[in-house]
Image: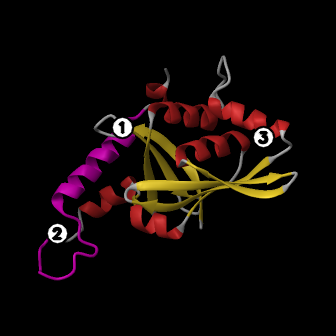
Amino acid sequence: MVLVHVSGVALDPSRQYVILLKPADQAPGEGSILPIWIGEQEATAILVAVEGAAVPRPLAHDLMRALLDAAESQVVQVEVTRLDGGTFYAEITLATPLGERVVDARPSDAIALASRVGAPIFVADAVLDEAGVPDPSEAAEEDATTDTADDGGSDEGVVDEDAADKLAEFQRFLDDVDPDDFRS
């Protein structure tokens, strides 16, 4: 498991919300990020928690936190455990008066809850290996030196021009995104 933090919430070029998870031991522009596409309500919930923004009425994840407090329980950690058929799976580990319990959850809900209570967020190594992408800041620099020639051998380490263009477009998007774009 790799400890991560919420690096950001953004809209991709097709106007889908994506949460970006970054390994905690990597500086911005280094290593990789894990993009997980989420719904608009979940994006708002995560942004509210990460920014510590006040809301006029409690959101669903605020209710979850209040229910846990009322049940004298705490979120120990959140884990993005696997990726199956393009769907991410997560678990929330709770410390309860009856002992430790693990609850199945959508990653967006688990991350929104963890962000509210200050619980650590982990991603399975296999998930990061399979779905992680180079940090766009780092990838943009590498694009200029990546060999795209087809030598008939392994494609490992080779970035095709279409993928490089998409990554560069995503980087431009990240450079220009403003958190106010996500406020309702």
Q: Is residue 37 above or below residue 120?
A: above
Residue occupying image coordinates x 50% and y 43%: 8
The residue mark sitting in front, 2 or 3, is: 3
Residue at 11%, 75% in the rendered image:
150
Residue that carries the numbered disc 3 in the rendered image: 68
> Which mark is on residue 16?
1
Q: Nearer the viewer, residue 49 or 158?
A: 49
> What stretch of residues is rendered in magenta?
148-177
Q: Residues within 10 Å of mark 3 (few under 14, many from 20)?
A: some
Residue 51 placement: quadrant: top right
Q: Earlier in the sequence, mark 2 or mark 3?
A: 3
Among numbered discs 1 and 3, the one appearing first in the sequence: 1
Callout 2–callout 3 Cβ contact below 8 Å: no
Q: Going by the image, does 155 lie left or right of 33? A: left
**Residue 168 within the magenta-colored segment of the rendering:** yes
Q: Residues within 10 Å of mark 1 (few under 14, many from 20)?
A: few
Q: Residue flagged by tag 3: what amino acid is it?
A: Leu
x and y, in percent, of residue 47 in the image: 56, 34
Q: Nearer the viewer, mark 1 or mark 3?
A: 3
Which residue appears at 69% of the width and 31% of the height? 62
Element marked by disc 3: helix
Specify whether residue 164 is in view: yes
> What percent of the width, then of the height, locates residue 99?
84, 58
Residue 161 drawn in magenta:
yes
Distance from the alpha carbon under mark 1 to that under mark 2: 29 Å
Q: Residue furthest top?
A: 56
**Distance CA(mark 2)–CA(mark 3):** 52 Å
- Given this view, does label 1 or label 2 mark the residue nearer the observer? 1
Q: Helix or strand or loop: what does disc 1 sit on?
A: loop
Of the residues under marks 1 and 2, which one precedes in the sequence? 1
The residue singled out by tag 2 in the image is 148
Where residue 44 appears, as percent x and y from the top left, is: 52, 31
